[in-house]
Image (cartoon, rainbow, N blue to C red):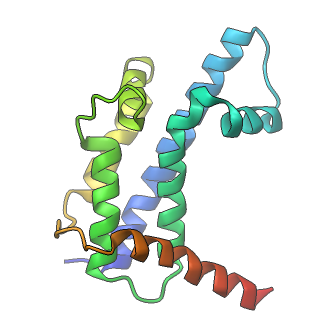
Amino acid sequence: MPNPSEFLQALRAPLIELHRLLLSLLKTDRDQTSGRVMAPTEWFQVLLGAPEYAWVKPLNTLLSDVDALSEQRKISSADLSILHHQINFLFFSDNQDVTSFNSHYRKLFSQSHDLVFAHGKIKEATASWPLEPLPMNSEEIRLGWHKIGASKRKLLN
């Protein structure tokens, strides 16, 4: 069985590609709706501030979590379990809540075969991950990934 770092490495590239494809698809839709092509900085501001894109934030958080966890020296099975549960909840649960990431995301499948393919790559990258019970203090552990990374960055600057 691969070590936890190898699991993360196998996930990171397809997750970044999926994020890129999703944002590109959303920008194209926005440009078509508005009748003009937005500059990247304007699009970024719209994406961050417009309520209709609030559903994308969990994916941004997941990417941030993967990056923060990748900076850790030791990745535990509890860390992988937390990440695996987040991935399953975002991408593979059948969430009928119309405000959820999953609900919005799955509606875009009909617009992009590349997005569906990237979704499959995420599934493939996580298929062999051990699925352990979620630790009771999972939110605290997850937030700790970011504190450790921030501490390292402060030392480097």
Q: Relative to 89, is 145 above or below?
A: below
Query: Residue at 27% across / 34% down in the picture?
Result: 95
Q: Is residue 107 left or right of residue 53?
A: left
Which of the 4 quarters of the picture holds residue 2? bottom left
- Residue 122, image x, y percentages: 34, 49
The front one of 2 and 64 is 64
Q: Relative to 151, is 134 above or below?
A: above
Quadrant for the N terminus in the image: bottom left
Which of the 4 quarters of the picture holds residue 85? bottom left
Q: Relative to 19, is 25 above or below?
A: above
The front one of 5 and 145 is 145
- Residue 43, image x, y percentages: 74, 32
Query: Residue at 39% across / 41% down in the picture?
Result: 118
- Residue 31, image x, y percentages: 71, 17
The front one of 58 and 112 is 58
> Does residue 70 appear in this view?
no
The number of callouts visible is: 0
> Does residue 25 appear in this view?
yes
- Residue 136, image x, y percentages: 26, 73
Q: Is residue 20 left or right of residue 96?
A: right
Quadrant for the C terminus in the image: bottom right
Query: Residue at 37% across / 82% down in the picture?
Result: 75
Q: Is residue 133 left or right of residue 19?
A: left
Q: Relative to 80, is 55 above or below?
A: above
Query: Residue at 58% across / 79% down in the picture?
Result: 147
